[in-house]
């Protein structure tokens, strides 16, 4: 399948996770405009990396990390066909391997890390192994992801992730062990009148970044926000339109 945005095109037919509203919302909401050095963990088709390229300053550098071979090939193709082939660099491999190489090279830490992570820790898995790995924490647990974020995120940087409500508590309860906390949380309601079913988290280091895990409460309270995607008649909300207008063709 393919999806054409205003400034780039995505071919995701080889990817375990297709283009989704979740990913578009994450790429549009994340505070990327002041970030020069961006990491996309589990890049898949490269959607978030290319959204970041569209939104970020001219002197940006974006690294897309993807472990699945078919998805990495699709990602590389989409990068090459985009307006930013020199901006986005693909690393084909596990994020844990990228972390070791990056730190061994003494490369700079990232201003922003963005990730639409595998989010189901339990439950029935898809027969397609690529789709199962994209949706379930088979190759990247919450703890492993948070450990990577804590090591690769710059002291004043932000990591943005999107999660379903059923995974939110498990994810957030582990953050403190890695010296991280939720600075902002956007709760997403699919249709007006329903409960939120997704949340985007803006994660930051505790103010005092140390070598040891911080076991006290976060020094700053989380800022909570909420948005609705569609009204009861199925029309996009003004918030949704404003957020996604730079990307969707028909907005």
Image (cartoon, rainbow, N blue to C red):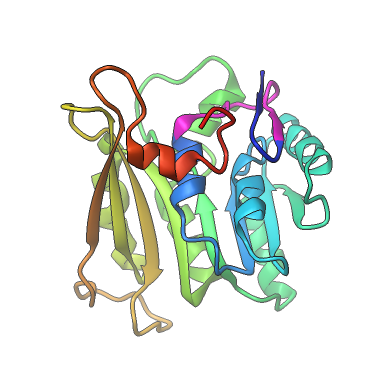
Along the line of sight, the residue nearer the viewer: 119 or 19? 19
* Residue drawn at 22 percent across, 56 percent down: 224
* Residue drawn at 44 percent across, 35 percent down: 22
Which stretch is magenta?
9-21
Q: Position of residue 204 (x, y in %)?
A: 39, 68
* Residue drawn at 64 percent across, 49 percent down: 49
Task: State left or right for residue 70 relative to residue 223.
Answer: right
Give the quarter of the figure containing the N terminus. Answer: top right
Kindly tell me whether residue 137 is visible in this rendering: no
Q: Main secondary structure of the magenta part?
A: loop
The part of the image, by quadrant, that contains residue 102 is bottom right
- Tell me, yes or no, whether the highlighted magenta stretch contains residue 15: yes
Q: Position of residue 166 (x, y in %)?
A: 26, 35
Q: Position of residue 55 (x, y in %)?
A: 60, 55
Q: In this picture, is 22 found above or below 111? A: above
* Residue drawn at 38 percent across, 38 percent down: 240
């Amino acid at each position: 399948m393919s999806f054409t945005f205003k400034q780039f095109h995505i071919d995701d037919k080889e990817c375990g996770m297709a283009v989704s509203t979740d990913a578009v919302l994450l790429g549009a909401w994340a505070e990327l405009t002041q970030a020069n050095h961006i990491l996309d963990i589990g890049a898949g088709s490269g959607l978030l990396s290319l959204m970041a390229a569209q939104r970020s300053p001219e002197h940006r550098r974006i690294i897309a990390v993807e472990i699945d071979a078919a998805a990495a090939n699709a990602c590389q193709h989409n990068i090459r066909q985009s307006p930013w082939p020199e901006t986005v660099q693909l690393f084909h491999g596990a994020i844990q391997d990228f972390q070791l190489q990056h730190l061994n090279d003494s490369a700079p830490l990232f201003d922003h890390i963005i990730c639409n992570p595998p989010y189901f820790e339990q439950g029935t898995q898809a027969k397609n192994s690529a789709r199962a790995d994209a949706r379930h924490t088979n190759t990247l647990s919450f703890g492993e992801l948070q450990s990577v974020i804590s090591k690769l995120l710059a002291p004043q940087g932000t990591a943005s992730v999107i999660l379903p409500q059923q995974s939110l508590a498990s994810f957030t309860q582990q953050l403190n062990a890695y010296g991280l906390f939720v600075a902002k949380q956007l709760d997403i309601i699919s249709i007006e009148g329903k409960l939120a079913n997704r949340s985007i988290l803006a994660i930051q280091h505790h103010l005092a970044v140390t070598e040891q895990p911080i076991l006290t409460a976060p020094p700053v309270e989380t800022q909570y926000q909420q948005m609705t995607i569609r009204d009861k008649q199925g029309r996009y909300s003004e918030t949704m339109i404003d957020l996604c207008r730079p990307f969707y063709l028909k907005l």
